[in-house]
Image: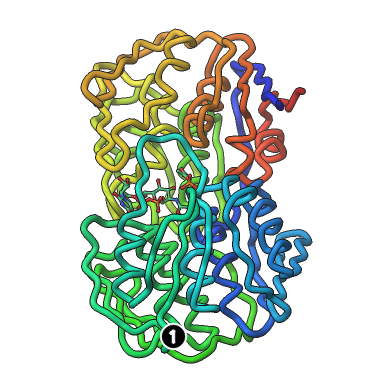
Amino acid sequence: MKKMLIHGGKKLSGEVIIGGAKNSTVALIPAAILSRTPVTLEAVPHIRDVENLMAILEDMNVKSVFKDTVLTIDPTHIVDTPLPSGKIKSLRASYYFMGALLGRFGRAVVGLPGGDDIGPRPIDQHIKGFEALGAKVSDDRGAIVIQAPAEGLHGARIFLDMVSVGATINIILAAVTAHGRTVIENAAKEPEIIDLATYLNNMGAIVRGAGTDAIRIEGVPELHARAAHTIIPDRIEAGTYLAMAAAVGDGVFVKNIIAEHLDAYLAKLEEMGVSMDVNEDSIYVYPSGDLKMVQIKTMPYPGFATDLQQPITPLLLRAQGEGIIVDTIYPKRVRHIPELERMGADITVENDVIILHHAEHLQGAEVVAEEIRAGAALLIAGLMADGDTVISKVDNILRGYDRVVMKLHNLGADVEIIE
Ligand SMILES: CC(=O)N[C@H]1[C@@H](OP(=O)(O)OP(=O)(O)OC[C@H]2O[C@@H](n3ccc(=O)[nH]c3=O)[C@H](O)[C@@H]2O)O[C@H](CO)[C@@H](O)[C@@H]1O
Ligand SMILES: C=C(OP(=O)(O)O)C(=O)O
């Protein structure tokens, strides 16, 4: 198992270019099987999740080639294949094959997905959506079996019980080729959903209202990709480097950003006193002076993203006073806390509320990245700390952070991957 060794205490400077959004990419790749023609994706991040999705495509006789940042996927010889276990467990987003296979073949057998241990992650809303479209859903020894009626799926009005990114996307994937009109209410509004809608619409789908809480879909018989699709920048990767720049930067340019996607996050950084120039597609972060402690509550988009709760935590440790973090999306997303404590942070969790205080110093330690964003928090803490930090289970970071070691080297960080 690979580890990351960080020699802490160095100031970072220079520039970092943000890659394509992981959470778009992992939906766009499964969605490619809806196309009857080859698909080209640009600005694809180099992450393990992409490698794992390419391996799943291979199992369906869908060839894909990844060169530089361009991924081509040829679904023209796809074979309707059950995916009950194995690689499906390698990532969370493999559940998008449920909606995509259902849309393409009218049936899907897909194992329950793996993914990050951030507390319970049920998929009841996905299933409710498939059933509303007319599918029968059953469980066969841990695999979800979804079958459309003989006449195919039909449009429906679906009101989600809670705002779910995954359920919104899965229902869109199944509904784009259903007969008639589907309306998803209380839909998630994340930028990645707009990205998916743009991609599908360019293939001939009719998806309207993405980015609002009511998405309307008129089913069409078939989709055909024509032009390449460029994936939006990863707002979570951007937020991670912004926190890093504010924590240990000596002047850092973060490039390829859509600042609007980070509104809630940038507002918090400003409230803390982080000094930044926010430009059209880049942000320059000045070296930080004294920082003010803030309170954070995660919410669905456009609120403060749960995926940035952990990356901002080490930066909060630089601020004076007591800080509080409440993650309303994943209240149990606290796997970084014991590890930060091991590094000398004064941080605890009481009744799912994270309480932290200013840390004069962090000390390098042996820590574990139990999931992707816990890993990001430990990476930033390791850069801030005196001495060496060794992060094990670093694959959890590599699965979602594009060429992270190269990007850190470019900023002057002293980090390496060790066996
Ligand atoms: C690949 C991807 O895009 N992952 C993101 C996606 O995960 P994911 O799509 O899995 O998260 P959801 O938006 O679905 O989850 C939001 C909340 O709804 C609950 N829920 C969800 C579905 C369901 O059927 N039943 C249910 O109860 C979840 O437990 C959670 O509390 O959105 C999360 C919330 O922004 C992010 O942290 C993840 O990075
Ligand atoms: C939780 C995350 O991802 P996933 O949904 O892929 O597990 C994340 O990106 O922070």
Where residue 331 appears, x then y in whole percent?
A: 29, 34
In-image side of 31 versus 58 (left or right): left
Residue farthest along the front direction in this orientation: 140
Please indicate, yes or no, whether residue 266 appears anywhere in the rendered image. Answer: no
Q: In this view, does 70 lie above or below 121?
A: below
In-image side of 313 versus 374 (left or right): left
Where residue 314 appears, x then y in whole percent?
A: 43, 24
For the point 53% across and 71% down, which residue is it?
101
For the point 52% across and 8% down, which residue is it?
363
Q: Label 1: how many residues lie within 10 Å, few (<14), some (14-19) or many (20+)?
A: few
The foreground one among 92 and 270 is 92
Callout 1: SS: loop
Q: Is residue 307 above or below residue 82?
A: above
For the point 70% across and 66% down, which residue is it?
71
Three-letter code for the amino acid on which mark 1 is drawn? Ala
In-image side of 87 versus 358 (left or right): right
Where residue 230 appears, x then y in whole percent?
A: 59, 69
Q: Quadrant of the N terminus?
A: top right
Q: Quadrant of residue 334?
A: top left
Residue designated by label 1:
150
Q: Is residue 159 above or below residue 46?
A: below
In-image side of 61 versus 6 (left or right): right
